[in-house]
Amino acid sequence: MEQQIAAFQAANPWITVNMTLQPWEQRLETLLTSVAAGDPPHVTMLGRQDLPSFVLQNALTPLDEFMERDGITPDMFLESEWRGAQYNGQTWILPQPTGGALNIAWYNKTMFAEAGLDPESFPDTWEELWEAAQALTIQTDGFLDRVGVNVATTGGETPAFIVWLNANGGDWLSEDGRTILFNSPQGLEALQFMVDFTNEINGGIEEVQSFYSQTGEWENGPFYNNYEAIMLNGSWALFLIQDFSPDIEFGIAPLPIGPSGNPDVRGTAWGGWGYTIPRNDDLPEAELEAAWLLTKWLTTEIEDEGACWFIQQQQRPSPLSECDGYLLDGVTHPRAEEILNVMLYDRWVPIAPIQPQLNEVITNMTDEAMFGVKSAEQALADGAAAAQALLDAFWAEQDAS
Amino acid sequence: MSAVSHSRLDLSYNDTWLRLRNKLGKALIYLTIISLSLIFVVPLLSMFSMSLMPREQVGAWPPEWIPNPVQFENYAKALYFWNFAQSFRNTVLVTGLSMIGDLLSCTLVAYGFARFRFPGRNALFMVLLGTLMLPFAVTMVPLYIGYNAIGWVNTFNPLIVPHFFGNAFYIFLLRQFFMTIPEELTDAAKIDGAGEFQIWARIMIPLARPAIIVVAILSFQTHWNDFLGPLLYLKDQQLHTLAIGLYKFQGLPGQGSLYNEMMAATVLMVLPVLVVFAIFQKQFVQGVTLSGLKG
Amino acid sequence: MSSATVQPLVRKRTLNPFRDLSPARRREALYGFLFISPWLIGLVIFTLGPFIASLILSFTNYSILQPGRWVGFDNYIRAFTNDDLFWISLRNTVVYVVGSVTIRVILGFVLALLLNTKIRFLALWRTLFYIPSIVPIVATTIIWLYVLNPRFGLLNWFLGFFGVPRLRWLTSPDTAMLGLLVMSSWWVGTTMIIFLAGLQGIPEDYHDAAKIDGANAWQRLLRITIPLMTPTIFFNVIIGIINAFQVFTQALIMTNGGPLNATRFYMLYLYDNAFGYLPPQMGYASALAWILFVIIFVLSLVVVRSSDRWVFYGN
């Protein structure tokens, strides 16, 4: 990062950049208080999950004018990354780096072969996944010894339901963030699939949770220690596998689609990051210009030690279509192409301003169906109603003020 | 037990039977106590043993007790990879300063309540006791908002500064103690021309040493173990205390890390308290008993 | 120790009580206030101020990100009529309070009784039972995560000796609360010590007299010990209730309210509202805090009032 900044300063000698690290948990308050106080940082990194909140708080500067002027166009970026940069029809951040998608099925080829499956071919649909999992899951006396794949939870912030809904061609929220859409046939199929799969193949949700209580995080994670045949994760898992379990022969595949799914839409682009310019009405022209130049450098600079170089040093995929993120010192990572191919099937999914509360509702709804407290239909309907109520209350408040 | 007289033979038979029953009763009592205490001792022991285990041994069923091989790396990992060395320093800092604040302010205030008559003294003392019953939840949110407004969130200040303004329970303990000190001692000093603060510092404090030690112990334990305060106010990883470090170490619920490293980190936090307790046992128990007697 | 100033029988009501005092007494009073001033100042800043502020906040929808507006009783109405989690969390907390206080009082009393017989190494046993209470609560949760682990935990291993199959504990909504209640016995040490002190305060003469009258151990327990211990029981119950209502840390760390809200306690819900949700619902959280305060206060009053009936002071 520092090298990037040094290069930027070299290319623009009239600008000096100070970089500070912020604690993650206070990012909202810190930024908003500084905007209100009139002295926010010129440029800041922002998670796409936070974008709606910040836009609604009027805390960011729209970037469209700058982009038009300097010829930055949407098609420079991968579409799934780009969509997340927009809200209410305006552009607020420029994406960098990637990594906000849950889109890849990392699978253990050796386990596939042992189970009698073709290690070079990964299930394309949920039906095929079902069959494969039956061969891959090992149980003894009702206790799981090895899981084929866990469809009930994702172990991250993204609720599993949204991932499967997306893979089934469904939407969960309208683009304007006001209407819940997941109480649909695709939603029901997705939830039912999750419940049935967990119950019939993985022995029920309680057994799954009990099973995972004996694994851990990082190098103690299930996939790296042969507790799982298939891990659903994002592109960053490449390096985790290399670090923690270099001996595993692993395959890379896109997520299987459901009965109502679309073969071109598989991964869920949920989060990710970007750079943004907080709103500061008193900022002199020159400083605003400098802020824009820095943002541009950090996100779009192909030549020199800018955005592209930064990503390549980390050997990660880049949001810029032109930049081959995996190219380091003239050598492309051997698995790069597979990953990039999978990323073509990512689809951006909207974020709501009250996302934590909605996540809770969705997780609760999934649990109710999983634990058998309600039928999938009932849970889905109730969950959608609860989520919609929360949204309505929020927007009523928002529109009134 | 009837009062009917027995022949000597019967009497001795009853006697033996009685003694046997007593012995059995005693044995039963010991047995119960030992088995109940195991409920508490065994988990603590396994904490120690698990902290030295390699990963493979952790999930053994039935549980294994001896680490094999003994793996000290767990501690190294906790200290350096998970930053516990720094958390330890932070905890020592916060605990130490808070203890100083507690002792300083509570001795002052307790002395005021014990030795001086002023209007409203009883009412204020009732208020003091009343604040002991106030749930923290009621003041938690405004305190946070206030601290945030003056930029104290993400610093140590909210954890340390309030303790320089007294703590109701310690004030109560110290006041009770001060009141047992005879007036003659202070009268003599006053005649010699000593000022009030000198009396407080030179006479009352040394005399109150036993109670002060109890308060110091209780204060140490409270601040070392504090979780909610650091949770609310310490956001930066560099500021974390051991309590928060442990919490973050553990990860998402239901997806915990592996126990061997976690136990090593836990031992790092528990050991100092155990050591202090071992040295000052009597005072610990005294403190608890006093809190009961006040009821 | 009440202040005994000499006052005329008919007291003039003065706004300034200082005026009635002699200069020496006035000086004493000033010094008194000086010495207690740290506490007084702290009282205003850290207790009274926030206390009142939270009441005011509870009538707004303040979120730290934007100034809120006045909403009157809406928060309170919403809690009682339009919020499932409010009732769920309240119910869970009440269950926990009843369960944990019962466990701790009964177990603590039994232990104290056992330790009060003339056994050797009393100090050792007392220490052993008390040590768990001084362990930091975060550490305790980690230890108990292991104890309650459904696959290889200590509790399941122990129950296995009695033929009980491995239970799911915190991973199942049916047993999660039970797991936390079992865990609450960890802190029986403090309760036990207070009971022990109380037991040792009962004069031997009472027991001796009863023995002479022919009472056996069981009758002595019921007729003498328990009645004389009622003040201590009363104290432990009240303290237990006040503390148990604020249960939070275990739920946050071990289950985060799950599974399926089985361990979503009131304090956890409050905390989520203030610090977890976007935008933060600080006004609502303040209302929840005040509701809790009133509940605890009323409950304490009830126990205190009822104590007239069953608490036995004096002889």
Image: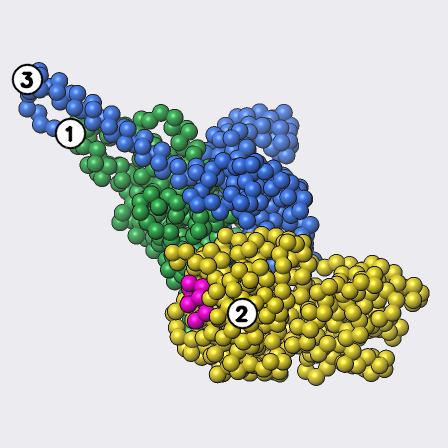
Chain colours: A yellow, B blue, C green
Residue ID at (50%, 60%) = A147
Task: Look at 61% across and 52% down and name the residue there.
Answer: A219
Return the residue found at the far top: B8
Amino acid at pointer 2: Ala
In the displayed structure, C104 sits above or below C272; it is above
- Callout 3 secondary element: loop
Q: Residue at x 52, y 40 (%)?
A: B50
Q: Nearer the viewer, mark 1 or mark 3?
A: 3
Task: Identify which residue is drawn at 6% across, 21% down.
Answer: B5
Q: CA distance from mark 2 to mark 1?
A: 72 Å
- Quadrant in which the C terminus of chain A is drawn: bottom right
Q: Dot 3: within a 10 Å radius of its alpha carbon, few (fewer than 14), some, or many (20 or more) residues?
A: few
Q: Which residue is mark 1?
A: C213
Front residue of this view, candidates A103 and A160: A103
Give the residue type that dot 1 points to: Asp
Q: Nearer the viewer, residue B251 or C3?
A: B251
**Label pair 2/3, CB-CB below 8 angstroms:** no
Is residue A296 in view from this perspective? yes
How far from the left and from the top, in percent, is residue A371? 41, 67
- Circle 2 is placed at which residue position? A160
Out of A242 and A194, give the one closest to the viewer.
Answer: A242
Q: Which residues are magenta?
A: A196-204
- Tell me, yes or no, whether the highlighted magenta stretch contains residue A200: yes
Q: Is residue C76 visible?
A: no
Residue under pointer 3? B7
